[in-house]
Image (cartoon, grey):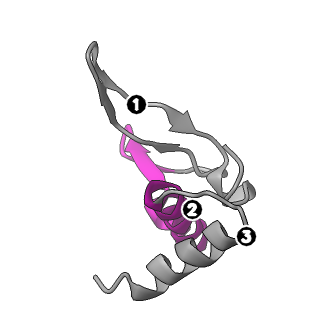
Amino acid sequence: ADMTELMALKDELAVLGKKVSYTDMFIKIVGLALEKNPLLNASVEDGKLILYKSVNIGIGVGSEDGLLVPVIKNVEQKSLFQK
């Protein structure tokens, strides 16, 4: 993937004193994509398609105690700078 524009945006934000990681940016990008494509923000339960109103994204984080998966709720409603 060509990351040129994303890298430039990260640098511009850093100059403005806004520290964001690539992970922060990917979470926001995926959240917006899921909001625009609601069939991807869904699951199947008992043969029925369940569409979710909010976008919640879990990110796997390795630690000494094992894998942790914190969930960021309502990603589509948050700015890039909100945690």
Circle 1 packing at 10 Å, graded few (<14), some (14-19), many (20+), is few
Amino acid type at image mark 3 = Leu
Q: Which residue is mark 2?
A: 28
Q: Which residue is mark 3?
A: 16
- 15 left or right, relative to 71: right
Residue 23 in the image, given as x and y percentages of width and height: 45, 55
Find residue 80 and report its image quarter: bottom right
Find residue 83 and report its image quarter: top right
Circle 2 packing at 10 Å, graded few (<14), some (14-19), many (20+), is many
Classify mark 1: helix, strand or loop: loop
The residue segment tinted magenta is: 22-50
Residue 32 in the image, given as x and y percentages of width and height: 59, 68
Q: Nearer the viewer, residue 79 or 43?
A: 79
Amino acid type at image mark 2 = Lys
Whole-number angstrom distance, CA of label 1 to CA of label 2: 17 Å
Residue 67 in the image, given as x and y percentages of width and height: 28, 25
Circle 3 packing at 10 Å, graded few (<14), some (14-19), many (20+), is few
